[in-house]
Amino acid sequence: MDISACNRIEGRIADLKQGKATTNVRIDTPLGEITAVVTSSSVEALQLAAGDTVTALFREVDVMLMAGQGTISTRNRFRGRILDIKKGGVTAELPLDVGGGRRITAVVARTAAEEMGLEVGADVIACVREGDLLLAKAGALSARNQLAGTVTSLRPGTVTTELTIDTGGGEIFALLARSVAEDMKLGVGDRVTALVRERDFLVRR
C-alpha cells in the first residue's frame, strides 16, 4: 500500500471506546501506547476489534516537536534524535531516529525550527494528535473519502511539493513532503487517489 503519509507505526489494538460519531482506539506499539480517534462508521467498516494488528499512519505536517519539558494536549509522544534538517523558504523537514530502526519525519515552519534552536543531533519529542492518525487494516483504511484522479501538475519546492489532481469533476490540490513525492515517483499523468479524513472537511452552505 503506497500512501503519501510516510510515517507508519504498526501495533495491536488494546481497546476501543466507541461513541455515536467517533471511537477512541488505543494501540500498543513498539514505541509505546498511542491513541487514535476515528469515525465510528470507519471502525464498523474495517471491523476493528481488540487484538487486531493495524498500522497507524500520519503525515509529516501533523507532527509537532517539543524540546525539553512542557505540557501538550496529546498522549502520542515519541522521543527521537534529529538526523538531518532540510530548510526551505517557509518550512523545514526533519527526519527523526525514534529507536529500533524506526524513523518519523516532521515538517514544521522554518521559523519554528529556528526559534527552537533545533539542530542535527538534538533530542526532541515528536507529538501527534489523536485525530491525525489514519488506521490501516489488511489494506483497508479508516479514511473513506477517496477521490481518484490524474496528476496534471507538480510544483516542487525545497521541502514540499504541490500536486494538482483532475478528478473529472474538478481539480483538487495536495501538498506533500517533497521526499514523499519523490519516493512515490509521482509524475504528470499518474493515476492517484486522494484520501481525505472526515475531520479535514470544511462544509459551506
Image (cartoon, grey):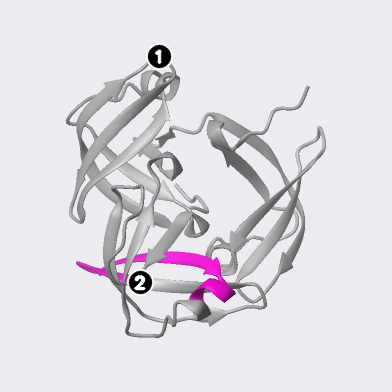
Within 10 Å of disc 1 (Cα), the crowding (few <14, some 14-19, many 20+) is few
Q: Which residue is mark 2?
A: 96
Q: Seen in the image, is 188 located left or right of residue 1?
A: right
Q: Which residues are magenta?
A: 97-113
Query: 87 and 137: which one is in front?
Result: 87
| Count of picture labels | 2
Magenta span: chief secondary structure: strand
Q: Which residue is mark 1?
A: 20
Query: 68 and 193: which one is in front?
Result: 68
Q: Please, what is the three-letter code of the amino acid marked with disc 1?
A: Lys
Residue 82 horizontal/vertical position (percent)? 36, 78
Quadrant in which the C terminus appears: top right
Within 10 Å of disc 2 (Cα), the crowding (few <14, some 14-19, many 20+) is many
**Can you tell which quarter of the image residue 156 is in?**
bottom right
Q: Seen in the image, is 32 located left or right of residue 48?
A: left
Q: Secondary structure at mark 2?
A: strand
Name the residue at 27% across, 23% down.
17
Q: Please, what is the three-letter code of the amino acid marked with disc 2?
A: Leu
